[in-house]
Amino acid sequence: MTLEETTAKVQDLASKKGGAIGSKIKFQFDEGVIYLDDTISPTTVSNADDYADCTVRVSLSNFNKLMSGDMNAMGAFMMGKIKVDGDMSIAMKLSNLF
């Protein structure tokens, strides 16, 4: 999936499960970023590189595997495929969204 397709998928998920995180999260890829602001209703999703409470660095292909359930987030974190900067407790809430 491209960054645009992945952004659209995250937007769809956020519209259904908005409010589950209550924070600002940035997913950082080599191709760009997906910024999710779940502090407002409705939740906004964009490709803006804004301030976030938590930044998750992951490859775009691994991010899509996480969203589809083909990769375990905890296992990927332990193997270094996911890096988290900022509030780790926010990253733990991502399972509520995906």
Image: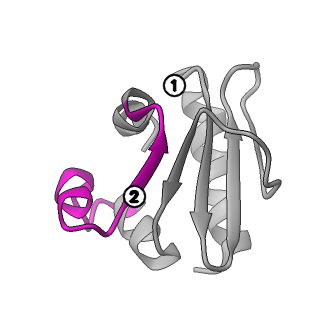
Q: On the rendered image, what quadrant is the N terminus found in?
A: bottom right
Q: Is residue 43 magenta?
A: no
Location of residue 62 in the rendering, given as x and y in whole percent from the top left corner: 39, 72
The tag on residue 83 is 2
Q: On the rendered image, what quadrant is the C terminus found in?
A: top left
Camera-nearest label, 1 or 2: 2
Kind of residue at disc 2: Lys
Q: Is residue 86 magenta?
A: yes
Residue position marked by numbered label 1 in the rendering: 21
Of residues 57 and 18, the one nearer the viewer is 57
> Horizontally, is 65 left or right of 75 in the view?
right
Location of residue 73 in the rendering, given as x and y in whole percent from the top left corner: 27, 54
Of residues 75 and 87, the one nearer the viewer is 87
Q: Which residues are magenta?
A: 68-88
Marks 1 and 2, how far apart in space? 18 Å
Q: Quadrant of residue 80?
A: bottom left
Say which element carries label 2: strand
The correct choice, above or below, for 3 with respect to 77 in the image is below
Q: Residue at x 76, y 25 (%)?
A: 42
The correct choice, above or below, for 30 with respect to 94 in the image is below
> Horizontally, is 32 left or right of 26 in the view?
right
Location of residue 7 in the rendering, given as x and y in whole percent from the top left corner: 68, 60
